[in-house]
Image: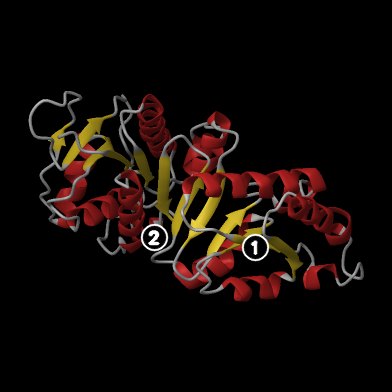
Amino acid sequence: MTLPAVGITLGDPGGIGPEIVLKALATQDQTSQVHYIIFGTQPILEQEMQILGLPLDIQPFRKTTEGPRPLISLYEVNSPIRPTAKGSASQENGKLSFRFLEEAVEQARKGDIQALVTAPISKYSWSLAGIPWTGHTDYLNSLFPQAIMTFWSDELKVALFTHHIPLRKATERIRRTALSDFILQLHSILEKTQRQKYRYLVAGLNPHAGERGLMGSEESTEIVPAIEEAQKKGIPVKGPFPPDIVFHKALGQEDTIVIALYHDQGLIPFKLMAFDKGINITLGLPFIRTSPDHGTAFDIAGKGKANPKSMSEAIRLVCSLATA
């Protein structure tokens, strides 16, 4: 039997990515009907397993489907670059983490893996390496313009209208047509891929959602018209709601997604509620992609202290979707 293949990137070698990948895989069911394929290098894995004392059975990846498939295999990503020490951003680690992602995405595009889980990367490491994208989703957006960054947990679900750009630029992008198209795209993707039916609450940009123009005009000139346009197309969306109450309205509501207008507006409440178990899901791809909702945690890298809960949840969810 050919098992569904789930790719897992190691992330930035200088951060906690390799650690949480191994810890999460160590707790996976050994009878799992999934083939986990790690995208990284043997030296990084060996060093991490030695630090953690986790002698996992990781076999070299082979594309042939003859014979039993291993539970975990390593897709060796060829690179002359060697990782630098843990605990800080570096050009070398930025190049390596990008190569891991690049190779994994290529295999996903070919259909050789059905889903992808990405360990945390350092945006600064990527910058040092001259990589023009500011993160996983930005890179995926360059290949799949319809990709949408969302964050999921039992407590709260958030979709980001804009994400890794300066706040000034984010506010400049809040325009009627762009926001209306985003709501339509988000709804269309979820209608096609999810059994659950969702409703959407749009956050306002200004305090009190503008207070009828007293604290800003974007709500009346751009956001309200965008929502009304989406409503005319039958989309169950409401707003704009004051940013300080919209997340409370959605809290614990399984069928509700908050549309946040910029990165921190959505991520501050989400991480407050689900830092250790929240999941980043990229919608609109031809394959499934999840990741933990946290970063590289350079301050604890190499110390064996990292909590793998979010990575475990990202793997669990992607496996349930890949085998559905």
Q: Which residue is mark 1?
A: 265
Residue 262 horizontal/vertical position (percent): 67, 55
Marks 2 and 1, how far apart at CA: 25 Å
The furthest residue to the left = 67
Q: Position of residue 37 (x, y in %)?
A: 25, 38
**Amino acid, disc 1:** Gln
- In this rendering, position of residue 9 left or right of residue 167: left
The residue located at (53%, 40%) in the rendering is 284
For the N terminus, which image quadrant? Answer: top left
Residue in the image at 48% along x and 33% along y: 129
Indicate left or right for 315 with 272 as reference: left
Foreground residue among 42 and 176? 176
Q: x and y percent of residue 279 in the render? A: 43, 57
Residue 197 sits above or below residue 131 on the image:
below
- Nearer-the-camera pick, 67 or 53: 67
Query: Quick one: label 2 or label 1, which is nearer the N terminus?
Result: 1
Please state which of the two labelled residues, at mark 2 or mark 1, is closer to the viewer: 1
At x 36%, y 51%, the residue is: 15
Q: Which residue is mark 2?
A: 299
Q: Secondary structure at mark 2?
A: helix
Q: Check if mark 2's residue and mark 1's residue have beta carbons within 8 Å.
A: no
Estimate how packed mark 2 is, as few (under 14), some (14 to 19) or many (20 or more) residues with alpha carbons within 10 Å: few
Does 119 appear above or below 139?
Answer: below
Disc 1 crowd, CA 10 A, few/some/many (<14, 14-19, 20+): many
Q: Is residue 135 visible?
A: no
User: Dividing the picture into quarters, in which one does residue 211 lie?
Assistant: bottom right
Tell me if I can see residue 116 in this picture. yes
Q: Nearer the viewer, residue 184 or 264?
A: 184
Disc 1, SS:
helix
Q: In the image, what residue type sits under mark 2? A: Asp
Horizontal side of 127 relative to 52 (left or right) equals right
* Residue 143: quadrant of the picture: top right
